[in-house]
Structures are given as C-alpha cells and as structure tokens.
Amino acid sequence: MHLVDSHCHLDDAQFNNDRAAVIERARQAGLKYILAIGTGNGPPDLEAAVRLADTHPFIYASAGVHPNDAAKADLDTLTHLESVLNHSKVKALGEIGLDYHWGVPKATQTPIFIRQLEIAANARMPVIIHTRDAWADTIQILRTHWKATGLPCIMHCFTGNSDAARECLELGFHLAFGGVTTFPKAAEIREAARITPADRLLLETDSPYLAPIPHRGKRNEPSFVVHTAAVIAETRGTAVEELAAQTSANFEQLFRLDQLH
C-alpha cells in the first residue's frame, strides 16, 4: 500500500535530532512521496524544503511566504520566489493565504497573498492555501484572483464543514485532510471528507503539528498519515488500500509526477 503526505514541515527544528529516522519511518510505512512545505521560518530563506528535496528522491518541495511572515517579505523576496519556483523539485507555491489568528495586520497579509497568486499563475503552478479565522476573505480572493486560471488549488488542513467543502469543490479546488479529521469531536470534518469526490481528495500530516489519534498531543510525523487514511476510508465506506491508491494518484496528477514515469 502506497501513501502520500501532501503537506509536512520536515525542516522544523523539532526534527533536528532524528530527521533521518523520521524519513526512514515514512518509507517503512509505505509513503511513496512527501511534499515538504518550504515556508520555513520566513524570508529571506525560501529554500528550506528544497534542501530536503535535493537529498531525497521521493521528497518534493513547495516554496512561498506564509501569511504570518508577510511582514518579512519585500520586492526582493518575491523576485527570489519566482526564481525558486524554477527548481525541478519545486511543485507548488505555498503555503500561502490569510491568518487572522495571530494579529498580523490584514493590510500586510493581503497584498502578499495576492501577489503570490499572480506569481503562481505566471509559473503555471498549483497553490497550497492556509486559512485561519479568515475564511470569507480567503475564498473571495481565490474567486477573484485564482479561479479563472484553471490551475489547481489545494485547501491545506481542511477543517471546514460540508458546506465549506462544497464551496471549495464548486471552485474546482482539492481538499487535503490531516490528523484533526481523526479527533472525536471532528464529525463535521469527517462528513466533509465523506462527500469530497475521490479525485479531489488528498492526505496530509502538517507535521510536526496536529498528530492524529492515537498520537494526539505528540510530535506528528509523515508516517502517521496511515491513521488519517484509515479513519477517512472508514468514513467513506471504502478499503484503506483503495483510498491510498486514489489519493496517491491524485497527488501524482496534481503535481505532474505521473509524467515523470
């Protein structure tokens, strides 16, 4: 059984003491690919994930400026981002979006979000979206600045209900579900996962954050995606092997990896 972790932060300092072992456990758990998210600690470093992807054939990378780091970004940052997207292992721009939880001014975040959408569109590259306490504004910007591109959009760590899921699905987006889906009180998220068409579904861990049951409260890691896969498969009434194959195929198609084989 092959699985994919479509979103993790392997560069995080929580992995500094055993990163190689974490990556080996992912392989042993059946992970065919990992997408390492390259937002890191924010500008000027945009290549946190590229460094990992360069040394592991099955790890791919994204690059981008997280909304919480928007104040660190300037014109040079965005010019450099355009360059990083040309790297052969970089498959998406992200995670980008809006986050009103930590107090970064909306006026600081919004132009950086929109400019990165423009950069991704020019590069014909998918985007990975982070949204927290900013749903309406995030969707409005994506409707205005992204939908017409026809390019893929992945709603990372989707934790909305079925109505929010349908809103994204009607826009043509993909939904990525992580460890929160396994939590006892996450019935609405599981319902969103249940109604998502099979070809729009992705699995992720968001490691080292948000570990699934039975590891909740501990450091998350890519191998734990198997627990999320099991819960979503049960929710959808399908075999976990079938879900694994479908979500892996979705990942390959989204990031054009099927064209490499």
Image (cartoon, rainbow, N blue to C red):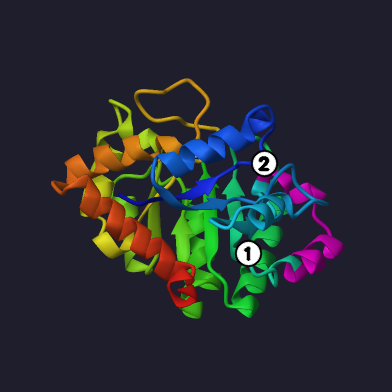
Q: Nearer the viewer, residue 254 or 95?
A: 254
Q: Is residue 141 above or below residue 53?
A: below
Quadrant assignment for the C terminus: bottom left
- Give the crowd class for mark 1: few <14, some 14-19, many >=20 residues within 10 Å: many
Q: Nearer the viewer, residue 87 or 162?
A: 87
Residue at image location 25% in from the left, 34% down from the top:
187
Taking 91 as reference, is 43 left or right?
right
Q: What is the magenta range?
A: 68-83
Which amino acid type is shown beneath numbered disc 2? Asp
Residue at image location 15% in from the left, 49% down from the top:
238
Residue at image location 74% in from the left, 70% down from the top:
82
Write down the residue under mark 2. 11
Furthest residue toward right? 76
Q: Is residue 105 above or below residue 257?
A: above
Taking 197 as reference, is 254 left or right?
right
Q: Quick check: can you spot residue 205?
A: no
Task: Assess whether mark 2 and mark 1 are in contact (beta carbons under 8 angstroms).
Answer: no
Q: Is residue 127 above or below residue 11?
A: below
Picture coordinates of residue 85, whole percent (x, y) = 68, 68
Which amino acid type is shown beneath numbered disc 1? Val
Q: CA distance from mark 1 to mark 2?
A: 15 Å
Picture coordinates of residue 102, whole percent (x, y) = 64, 35
Regarding mark 1 in the picture, which secondary structure is present there?
A: strand
Picture coordinates of residue 20, whole percent (x, y) = 61, 37
Residue at image location 26% in from the left, 43% down from the top:
232
Magenta stretch prevailing secondary structure: helix
Taking 122 as reference, is 148 left or right?
left
Write down the residue under mark 1. 90
* Residue 81 lies in the magenta stretch: yes
Who comes first in sequence, dot 1 or dot 2? 2
Q: Quick check: can you spot residue 85?
A: yes
Picture coordinates of residue 75, whole percent (x, y) = 84, 64
